[in-house]
Every structure is written in structure tokens, then in C-alpha cells.
Image (cartoon, grey):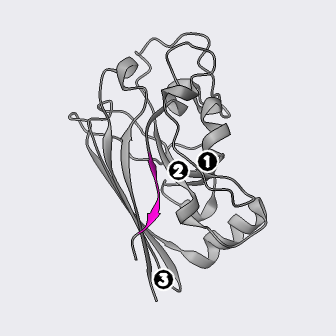
Amino acid sequence: MSKHYEAKIVSLNAAKIGSNPHGTAEFTEDESTLTIKIEMFDTPANTQHWEHFHGFPEGKVAAIATMAQDANGDGFVDLPETEPVSGTTMVPFDAAPERMSIPNDTYPVSDGDGHFVYEKTVPLDELQQQFKSAFGTTDLQLDKRVVYVHGVPKSLELPDTVAGIVGPYDAHVTLPIAVGKIEATD
């Protein structure tokens, strides 16, 4: 029996990034696979966009960040500022989500209009094994998670107060630009 989920993805930091990213995410979980489809519009053009689901390992329901999470008042909601309401980064939507290797260069790249479609079917057992290693459970609890899309061009000037370095990647890569709450549809 399949379980279906979707998220309406809305912009975050739109006033500062010069575009209004929005889109949808759809998830279908069956006995052996998780199928993911994310379509985004009006993202920063020709830019790689990290995307993940975030959540709380103990199962608390995650909420989307809004400008209210701009704790330091710099006009940006950066990655660390999302954590109190959205939890931690959990599963990447990259070339191999089942590996749960967050920092890499295999995420989608938007076209000249800021559009991209990401589609991937993931072996559920491999993903659940990695998820259990990281978070102590095989239950993805998608209906308690939020989807984030990240990434702005290096040319966008960010104040020094914008945090979010992950490995060799700076805040241009990790800055959240859109977010959506995942909800069960059946």
C-alpha cells in the first residue's frame, strides 16, 4: 500500500534574493521505494539548489520558518535560524538520497528562468538503514517534516551575519530560499 504526501513550497528570504521561489513537492512511499518529485519556479537562475527534508529526530512536528525566525535582525533567515522550528537537515534530494551525504554537487541546477524539476526513485531499505544510523529509527515520518530549497548565486552580497557553512560550502549554498510543510494526502 502506497502512502502519498505533498508540500506547497513558498518563498523565504524573497525580499533579499530578488526572486519569489515557489513550487510543489510530491512523495510516494511504497513497500520498497520512495519516489520524490519537486518542481520549482522563480528560483535564482542558473544556480545549484540544495534541497532536503528537515525535522526533529525525536518526532516533534517541524514547522516552516518565516521571517519571524530572523533572530539577529539582519533581514535574512539563514540555515541555523531555521533549526528551532524546523529541526535538522535529514535527507538530501540529490543524485543519491539514500546515501544521506549532504554536502555535494549533485543537486538540481535551475535553468535561465529559475525553473527545475527533480525526480528520483530511492530504494527505501537503503534510505531507512542510513536514516536509522543517523537518527535511530527507520520511520521517515514525512508528515512531520518540512522541505527546504536552498541556494543563491555567489554574486548576491550577503552580510557577514548570514551563517550556514557546511563543509567547504558557504552561506550562498545553504541560504534557504523556499520551504514547505509535508502533509499526508491520503
Residue 104 appears at what percent x and percent y?
56, 44
Residue found at the very far bottom of the displayed protein? 1
Residue found at the very far left of the displayed protein? 113
Q: Secondary structure at mark 2?
A: strand
Q: Disc 1 designates what residue?
A: 102
User: Which amino acid lies under the numbered mark 3 shown in the image of this protein?
Assistant: Asp
In the image: residue 100, left or right of residue 14: right
Q: Any magenta on residue 185? A: no
Residue 75 appears at what percent x and percent y?
49, 15
User: Which amino acid lies under the numbered mark 1 shown in the image of this protein?
Assistant: Ile
Q: Secondary structure at mark 1?
A: loop
Which quadrant holds residue 167?
A: top right
Q: Disc 2 designates what residue?
A: 52
Residue 161 appears at what percent x and percent y?
62, 13
Query: Which residues, given as a range, are shown in magenta?
Result: 180-184
CA gap between label 2 and label 1 equals 8 Å
Q: Secondary structure at mark 3?
A: loop
Look at 69% across and 73% down and name the residue there.
138
Residue 130 appears at what percent x and percent y?
70, 66
Q: Nearer the viewer, residue 165 or 136?
A: 136
Dot placed on the residue nearer the N-terminal end, 2 or 3: 3
> Main SS of the magenta segment?
strand
Q: Disc 3 designates what residue?
A: 30
Q: Are marks 2 and 1 in contact (CB under 8 Å)?
A: yes
